[in-house]
């Protein structure tokens, strides 16, 4: 369904180019060079970003290292106040930031306004609250010995951010890192480098110089330089599993810890009881199946494998196809548009190659399967029809992460078969289970090898609910207070009140 209203959110006015943000100042790249940033909305240049080099990374790390000497000693109260101020500033500029994010990434503004930016605000507020409520740990091991456990910030943190949620993924990493008392050098994705710079313009006065440093450039040129810098004490990365392996290898050079949120091929399982009534729950379940198209399918937890019990397949898939065809596409700045553009020409081409692969593998095309030609100013944008294929789980369409609006559909006969199919993957990031049966809604999620299993819902990411992967989907848990542990070192002070020696010497 292609349509666009005339009530577009205002297209943001952007600078011709954006410098790096280092040590509290907007700093031109040492190379003097900038690269063009293409908006997926229309395929045209929207601005330019700094094409940085090793020296820029070193300057940013040095600034963070120096700032840590002070920031690392600030009280949790001070840090909490600043995090809340950041949240307030973002909230006051929500529509503007959402519009920039849409132009940078291509996603529909209804998503950036209703999900991406509100969740960003919530995560800063969550960690602001968590650190105010923390208490220390002390225990008396015997009458003469007391154990005190203290948690200290780890230091300078390297954070590498993906292009599918440029601001939200930055918030997932920045909020806990800052809350824990660390300083950050953040490297945005080269295809979406603008929105985080605009956000930094809005909040730069709230933070001491050097606490957040942002360096733009190409991952292949800067990733290793950043992670292997001897002053970097931890690396955090969200992106593909292949790149995550490289980040992990870089981290071994100085033996630093990593947090990795990587790829997925999430199963979304629908049991027979879903169709027991034509009610609100069934309507919700149909939407749950169609959520593969959220963010144009460019989500690490995209429910890209749809598993339907064979007894309800025909009636259920008919409703899913109808709902998919009703997805409104059009100008991403139109608040009524449901699905926007893919993030880049490279990603668009990759998705189309998988659509062709599905046809070659013999999968049955149920709907979609081509580019979306929206005409006029949008014709140069990167739009693809939401696509459904029916096949089996051994097909590459079911096994490989496509990162686009392509849904691989299959059926199952028994609960055991559904679990077997769900777990037959390299990944283990997310999964969905839909049922009216009280036993299934507990036993099936427990059997699925995934770090997040949504039950009778999908694509909810509230702060306070830990998120992370099993298997090759990553290391660590974000969005929860346990993430503070990833950005800290624990010190044990073991204190003796016994004046007498041990007696060994």
Image (cartoon, rainbow, N blue to C red):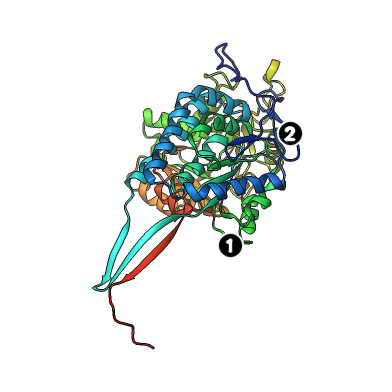
Query: Element type at marker 2?
Result: strand
Binning the other alpha carbons within 10 Å of mark 1 as few (below 14), some (14 to 19) or many (20 upward) gives some
Q: Residue at x 61, y 49 (%)?
A: 62
Q: In this view, does 496 lie to the left or right of 485?
A: left
Binning the other alpha carbons within 10 Å of mark 2 as few (below 14), some (14 to 19) or many (20 upward) gives some
Q: Is residue 76 left or right of residue 240?
A: left
Q: Residue at x 71, y 21 (%)?
A: 379
Q: In this view, does 32 lie to the left or right of 21?
A: right
- Is residue 44 something one can see in this rendering? yes
Counting from the top left corner in percent of width and height, residue 301 is at: 53, 42
Q: Which of 389 and 215 is in front in this view?
A: 215
Q: Nearer the viewer, residue 127 or 362?
A: 127
Q: In which quarter of the image is residue 214?
A: top right
Q: Residue at x 75, y 36 (%)?
A: 32
Q: Quadrant of residue 503?
A: bottom left
Disc 1 target residue: 255
- Kindly give the residue lying farthest to the top in the view shown: 6
Query: Element type at marker 1?
Result: loop
Residue 145 lies, with reference to residue 315, above or below; the image says: below
Gap in angstroms between the C-alphas marked 1 and 2: 33 Å
Counting from the top left corner in percent of width and height, residue 278 is at: 38, 28
Q: Quadrant of the N terminus?
A: top right
Counting from the top left corner in percent of width and height, residue 453 is at: 44, 46
- Is residue 261 something one can see in this rendering? no
Disc 2 target residue: 35
Q: Residue at x 51, y 22 (%)?
A: 95
Counting from the top left corner in percent of width and height, residue 448 is at: 46, 52
Earlier-in-chain disc, 1 versus 2 = 2
């Amino acid at each position: 369904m292609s349509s666009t209203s005339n009530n577009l959110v205002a297209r943001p006015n952007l600078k011709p180019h954006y410098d790096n943000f280092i040590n509290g100042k907007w700093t031109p790249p040492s190379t003097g060079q900038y690269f063009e940033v293409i908006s997926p909305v229309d395929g045209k240049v929207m601005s330019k970003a700094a094409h940085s080099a090793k020296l820029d990374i070193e300057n940013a790390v040095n600034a963070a290292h120096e700032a840590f000497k002070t920031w690392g000693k600030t009280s949790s109260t001070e840090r909490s106040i600043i995090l809340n101020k950041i949240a307030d500033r973002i909230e006051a500029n929500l529509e503007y930031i959402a519009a920039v994010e849409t132009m940078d990434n291509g996603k529909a503004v209804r998503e950036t306004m209703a999900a991406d930016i509100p969740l960003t605000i919530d995560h800063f507020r969550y960690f602001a609250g968590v650190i105010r409520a923390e208490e220390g740990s002390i225990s008396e091991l015997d009458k003469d010995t007391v154990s005190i456990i203290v948690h200290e910030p780890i230091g300078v943190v390297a954070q590498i951010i993906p292009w599918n949620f440029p601001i939200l993924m930055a918030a997932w990493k920045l909020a806990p890192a800052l809350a824990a008392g660390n300083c950050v050098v953040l490297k945005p994705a080269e295809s979406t480098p603008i929105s985080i710079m605009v956000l930094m313009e809005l909040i730069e006065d709230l933070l001491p110089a050097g606490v957040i440093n942002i360096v733009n450039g190409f991952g292949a040129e800067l990733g290793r330089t950043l992670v292997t810098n001897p002053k970097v004490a931890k690396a955090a990365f969200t992106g593909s599993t292949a790149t995550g392996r490289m980040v992990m290898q870089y981290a071994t050079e100085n033996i630093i810890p990593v947090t990795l949120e990587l790829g997925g091929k999430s199963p979304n399982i629908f049991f027979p009881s879903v169709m027991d009534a034509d009610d609100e729950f069934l309507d919700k379940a149909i939407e749950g199946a169609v959520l593969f198209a959220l963010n144009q399918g460019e989500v690490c937890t995209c429910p890209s494998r749809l598993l339907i019990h064979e007894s309800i397949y025909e009636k259920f898939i008919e409703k899913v196809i109808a709902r998919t065809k009703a997805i409104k596409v059009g100008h991403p700045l139109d608040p009524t548009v449901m699905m926007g553009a893919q993030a880049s020409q490279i990603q668009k081409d990759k998705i189309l190659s998988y659509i062709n692969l599905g046809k070659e593998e013999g999968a049955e095309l149920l709907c979609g399967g081509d580019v979306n030609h929206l005409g006029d100013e949008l014709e140069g944008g990167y739009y693809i029809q939401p696509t459904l294929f029916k096949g089996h789980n051994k097909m590459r369409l079911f096994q490989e992460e496509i990162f686009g609006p392509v849904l691989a559909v299959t059926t199952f006969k028994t609960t055991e078969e559904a679990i077997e199919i769900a777990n037959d993957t390299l990944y283990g990031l997310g999964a969905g289970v839909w049922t009216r049966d009280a036993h299934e809604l507990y036993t099936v999620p427990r059997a699925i090898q995934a770090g997040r299993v949504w039950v009778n819902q999908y694509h909810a990411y509230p702060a306070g609910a830990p998120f992370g992967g099993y298997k090759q989907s990553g290391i660590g848990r974000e969005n929860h207070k346990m993430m503070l542990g990833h950005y800290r070192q624990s010190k044990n002070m073991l204190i003796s009140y016994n004046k007498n020696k041990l007696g060994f010497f």
